[in-house]
Image: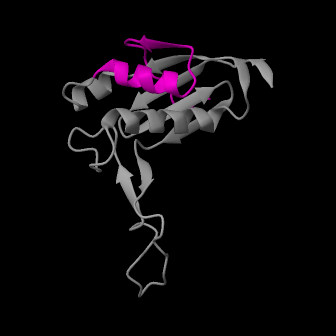
Amino acid sequence: MKLFCEDIEVYIEDGHFEFRRGKHVNRFEPFIYLLNDPKAQIEGPSGENTAMESHAIIRPFSKDDIGHPGISRKDAIEAFIARGFASVTKRMYLALPDVYFYGVERLESAIQGFDRSMLSDGAHAAGAKKCVFVENKKLNLGQG
């Protein structure tokens, strides 16, 4: 276990989110999978069940319905943020990281009524100490 975790940066671009912590960088399209039926079997090409049918695709940042009636947008955002954090943080830390969000205005224009507290709540649930929304910074993606 280490004492401090480097800050996590989340860059929001059209079509993906990029999570960075130091030299660790991962890009994700903004969706998660939710298991539909834990008893679903994956069969061959002629079978009725497939891996895709056993999972629902949840789009937390969709301007329309998120894709599943049994999960709230807030819960979906928390799960997505937790997935991103886990991808760049591989161990436990005593001191939690600060998280910086860049490009959040892209979400506000895409999702009517978007509230930054959804991202902040999701980040805190995933282990952030503090969330900072950085305004109007030119994104520097692809150079990690």
Q: Residue at position x 32%, y 36% from top?
A: 73
Q: Quadrant of the C terminus?
A: top right
Residue range highlighted in magenta: 115-144
Q: Residue at position x 63%, y 25% from top?
A: 21
Left or right of 70, for residue 55: right
Q: Quadrant of residue 78?
A: top left
130 in the magenta segment: yes
28 in the magenta segment: no
Q: Give the percent coordinates (x, y) of residue 63.
A: 22, 38
**Residue 140 seen in render:** no
Left or right of 6, for residue 3: right
Left or right of 110, for residue 81: right
Which of the pair 91/38 is nearer the observer?
Answer: 38
Q: Is residue 47 above or below residue 65?
A: below
Residue lying at the far bottom of the rendered structure: 46
Q: Residue at position x 36%, y 24% from top?
A: 118
